[in-house]
Image: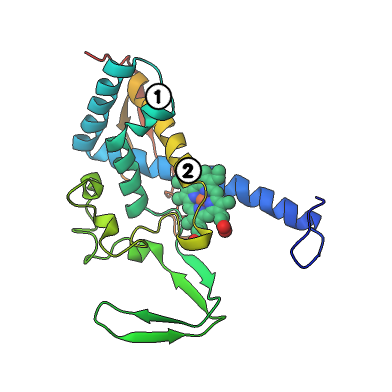
Amino acid sequence: MDSRYKDGRRTTEAAVAGMIIALIFAGKHSSTIVSTWTRACLLTHTMFLDAVVEEQREIMRKYKDNIDYNVLSKMETLHSCIKEAGRMHPATLGLIHQTQKNITVRTKEGSEYGIPKGDTLVNLVMLTSKLSHIYKDPEVYDPYRFHPGREEDKVGGKFSYAIFGGGSHACPGEAYAFLQIKIIWSHLLRNFEIKLTSPFPKTDWSKFVLEPKGKVLVNYRRRRLESN
Ligand code: HEM
C-alpha cells in the first residue's frame, strides 16, 4: 500500500484491490478451466488416457506415492495432454496489447505491414493455435505433437504457442499452473476410474474466459492404481 510508481504517484487502494482480484482470477480460474478441458479431452481419447495411467504406474514404481517437484517434472505425457487441451481450448479468447514503438510485421508470404506506436494489437489465440501450417491436423487432439521430433509448438517461432501469452507480459504463472494441474490429475488417476457421462462440451462463447458450456458430468469409481 505504501509503494509508489516510478513517477512518484502513490498506489491507490483501487489499484491494489484490482491486482489482487486479477491474481485470484488469473491463478484460479484459468487453471480450473484448463483442468476441465483436459478432463473432457482425456476421457474422450482413451489412447491418451491409457498413456497417462501407464505413465503414473511407471512413476509410482520408481517414486512410490511421493509427489514432489522432481516427480511432477517426469510426467511428460500428462504435461503434453494438458498443453494440447490448452491449445485446442484456450482459456483466453485473445491477447490484447498496445505497441510501445513503431514495428513492422512480416507475413509468411513476405508482405510487410507497418504498425505505428500506440496501436492496439490483438492475437486471437483461439485462431492462431489452430493454424494448419503450424499444427498438423489442428482439430485433432494429439498431445504427441509437442514431443521431440515434432515440436509443432516451435514451428512458427517462439510465439507459436501463445496460450500463456508471450513477451514481457507473458503469464508468470505458467509453470505453477502445470504443477497444479498435474497434481490434480495424478491424484485422480491414482485413486479413481473416471468416465465422462455427458457429451463432449461445447465452448461457452458468452464468457470472458472460454469455459465449457453447461455441466461436464463425470462418473468416479474408487480404485487404487497399482504400480505392478
Ligand atoms: C492454465 C492456467 C493459466 C493460463 C491458461 C493463463 C493464461 C494467461 C494469459 C493468456 C495471460 C496474458 C498474457 C498476455 O497478455 O500476453 C496471463 C497473464 C497473467 N497470468 Fe496467467 N494463466 C494461467 C495461470 C496462472 C496462474 C496459476 C497465475 C498465478 C499464480 C497466473 C498469473 C498471471 C498474471 C499475474 C498475469 C499478468 C501478467 C502481466 O500482465 O504482466 N496465471 N495468463
**Tag 2–tag 1 contact (CB < 8 Å):** no
- Is 180 displayed left or right of 159 in the figure? right
User: Toward which corner of the image does residue 184 lie, by quadrant?
Assistant: top left
Task: Work out whether residue 107 or residue 132 is closer to the camera in this orientation and state it.
Answer: 107
How was the colour assigned to the protein in this rendering?
rainbow
Q: Earlier in the sequence, mark 2 or mark 1?
A: 2
The numbered disc on residue 187 is 1
Mark 2 Cβ and ligand 1 under 8 Å apart = yes
Please tell me which residue is depicted at 43% across the width and 86% down the height of the picture: 114
Please tell me which residue is depicted at 31% across the width and 45% down the height of the picture: 200
* Residue 117 horizontal/vertical position (percent): 54, 82
Amino acid carrying label 1: it is: His
Quadrant housing the C terminus:
top left
The numbered disc on residue 215 is none
Q: Residues within 10 Å of mark 2 (few under 14, many from 20)?
A: many
Using the numbered discs, state the Cα–Cα distance from disc 2 to disc 1 in whole angstroms. 16 Å
Q: Is residue 206 above or below residue 200?
A: below
Which residue is the site of mark 2? 31
Amino acid carrying label 2: it is: Ser
Q: Secondary structure at mark 1?
A: helix
Q: Is residue 103 above or below residue 206?
A: below
- Is 68 displayed left or right of 128 in the figure? right
- Is 160 displayed left or right of 19 in the figure? left
Camera sees residue 29: no
* Residue 226 horizontal/vertical position (percent): 27, 13
Q: Secondary structure at mark 2?
A: helix
Please tell me which residue is depicted at 24% across the width and 56% down the height of the picture: 152
* Residue 26 horizontal/vertical position (percent): 56, 49
Mark 1 Cβ and ligand 1 under 8 Å apart = no
User: Toward which corner of the image does residue 71 lie, by quadrant?
Assistant: top left
- Is 4 displayed left or right of 107 in the figure? right
